[in-house]
Image (cartoon, coloured by chain):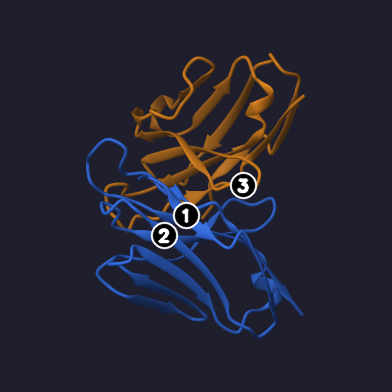
Chain colours: A blue, B orange
Amino acid sequence: QQQVKQSPQSLIVQKGGISIINCAYENTAFDYFPWYQQFPGKGPALLIAIRPDVSEKKEGRFTISFNKSAKQFSLHIMDSQPGDSATYFCAAFSSRRIQGAQKLVFGQGTRLTINP
Amino acid sequence: EAGVVQSPRYKIIEKKQPVAFWCNPISGHNTLYWYRQNLGQGPELLIRYENEEAVDDSQLPKDRFSAERLKGVDSTLKIQPAELGDSAVYLCASSFRPRSSTDTQYFGPGTRLTVL
């Protein structure tokens, strides 16, 4: 129940296209859903995050869509650029003060390649 | 402002040898996390500190792993003895308000450990 399932494992998109990465979770105690971007040799860096009381959040070319009833959320990268090539991780967090909570649970990651 | 600092960046050791990793979190961040990231996977929490107290070490293999955070600032993660399966990237992260559902964790670049 603590798992976050992410797909696809890898994705190739042409420059200017839309990249879409999907995640699903089971634990309804999760109340914060961040996306992290990781370049080779670097640690993950927060890209954008959403709470379950909204269905969409947009920051520049990056949008999170959130479907609470389906327990799914996705990252959309509009006008994808070669510089967006990286590994993307979705994650989920529960702020409840119970055992097993208050830690980020990461998906398996998606390696995104944007072809010029 | 300096980010999370980790050293060494790379470490190659023979199995059964000890190894230690060091982390200096962002100034003012009272919460520190150690994660392990296996190749092609998302990070998994090993231990979380609030100040100098380890508040979640449920995923730390205590037979061979130990950690400390003296004075509530820097932290050291140790493995003794190392096994082949310990080869991974060890990430340190820090945050300011861990109980907030919107708190951001900032990651260091990690230490890539190879056990031969």
Picture coordinates of residue A34, whole percent (x, y) = 42, 60
Quarter of the figure that contains the C terminus of chain B: top right
Closer-to-camera residue (B9/A50): A50
- Which residue corresponds to the image point at 57% horizontal and 55% vertical from the top-left? A109
Report the number of discs.
Answer: 3
Circle 2 Cα neighbour tier, 10 Å, few/some/many (<14 / 14–19 / ≥20): many
Q: Of helix, strand and loop, which one carries label 3?
A: loop
- Which residue corresponds to the image point at 60% horizontal and 15% vertical from the top-left? B80
Q: Residue A18, relative to residue B116: is it above or below?
A: below
Write down the residue under mark 2: A24
Picture coordinates of residue B53, whole percent (x, y) = 33, 28
Closer-to-camera residue (B35/A115): A115
- The answer to whether marks 3 and 1 sit on the same chain is no
Is residue A52 left or right of B70 when viewed as pictured? left
Q: What whole-number distance in Å separates the C-alpha atoms at marks 2 and 1? A: 5 Å
Q: Amino acid at mark 3?
A: Pro
Picture coordinates of residue A4, whole percent (x, y) = 43, 52
Q: What whole-number distance in Å separates the C-alpha atoms at marks 3 and 1? A: 24 Å
The tag on residue B109 is: 3
Q: Are marks 2 and 1 in contact (CB under 8 Å)?
A: yes
Write down the residue under mark 1: A5
Circle 3 Cα neighbour tier, 10 Å, few/some/many (<14 / 14–19 / ≥20): many
Q: Quadrant of residue A114?
A: bottom right
Q: Of helix, strand and loop, which one carries label 2?
A: strand
Q: Amino acid at mark 2?
A: Ala
Q: Residue furthest front?
A: A70
